Image: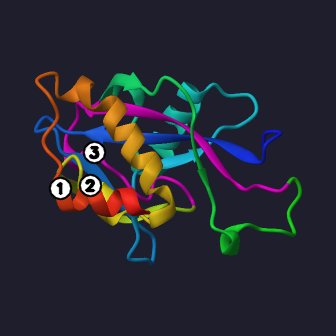
């Protein structure tokens, strides 16, 4: 499902633990890291898609997490030209995403990365709140930054942890 502007509707999932660290997944067979995410089917709401993707990619069910919040609006990113599949119709130029912040209520042993027939991740770790901005693929960095900035007050009511000046400048250049 691609919208009239060429964006595929998608959900992004930011999972946190009781120490306010974030789940960071390594894509199968790659040295590429990201948050769980996935497309929204035509018959789903973003929240329904989020819970489906959560189970498919991480093996967790709704009762194992607490929904802390969701971004107010769609966040967009465009694919670099070399990743656009020109032979596919309709043409997809990127994704528009609703981002969800979830708190894990279960044990780490409940995580199951091979819950689906085609796993997304083959490893994972807990990371500090802003670390994904340094490691995610460059064309997703702005969306990750906007999602983390918008959702940070839900996890850090006293104010989010600081971002180093150098990392902020590096992220702004891309």
3 or 2: mark nearer the eye = 2
Give the magenta-colored segment's residue range: 91-117
Q: Which mark is residue 168?
A: 2
- Rendered view: 28 above or below 110: below
Numbered tag placed on residue 35 in the rendering: none
Q: Is residue 78 visible?
A: yes
Mark 3 or mark 2: whose residue is earlier in sequence:
3
Q: 25 or 79, which is in the foreground?
A: 79
Residue 33 percent location from the top left of the image: 37, 64
Quarter of the rendering containing residue 135: bottom left
Front residue of 131/23: it is: 131
**Disc 1 versus disc 3: distance between alpha carbons?**
37 Å
Is the residue under label 2 in contact with that under label 3 (CB below 8 Å)? Answer: no
Secondary structure at numbered mark 1: helix
Q: Which residue is mark 1?
A: 165
Which residue is label 3 attached to? 110
Residue 1 shows up from this direction: no
Task: Tell me where residue 138 appears, x and y as whole percent.
Answer: 45, 65
């Amino acid at each position: 499902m691609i919208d009239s502007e060429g964006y595929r509707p998608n959900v992004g999932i930011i999972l946190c633990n009781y120490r306010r660290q974030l789940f960071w997944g390594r894509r199968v067979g790659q040295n590429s890291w990201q948050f769980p995410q996935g497309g929204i089917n035509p018959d789903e709401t973003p929240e329904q898609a989020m819970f489906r993707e959560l189970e498919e990619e991480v093996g967790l069910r709704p009762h194992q997490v607490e929904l802390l919040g969701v971004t107010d609006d769609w966040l967009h990113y465009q694919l670099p030209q070399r990743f656009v599949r020109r032979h596919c119709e309709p043409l997809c130029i990127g994704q528009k995403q609703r981002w969800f912040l979830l708190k894990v209520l279960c044990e780490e042993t409940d995580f199951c990365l091979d819950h689906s027939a085609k796993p997304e991740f083959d490893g994972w770790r807990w990371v500090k709140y802003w670390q994904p901005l340094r490691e995610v693929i460059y064309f997703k960095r702005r969306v990750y930054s906007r999602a983390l900035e918008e959702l940070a007050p839900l996890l850090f009511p006293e104010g989010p942890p600081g971002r180093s000046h150098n990392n902020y400048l590096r992220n702004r250049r891309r």
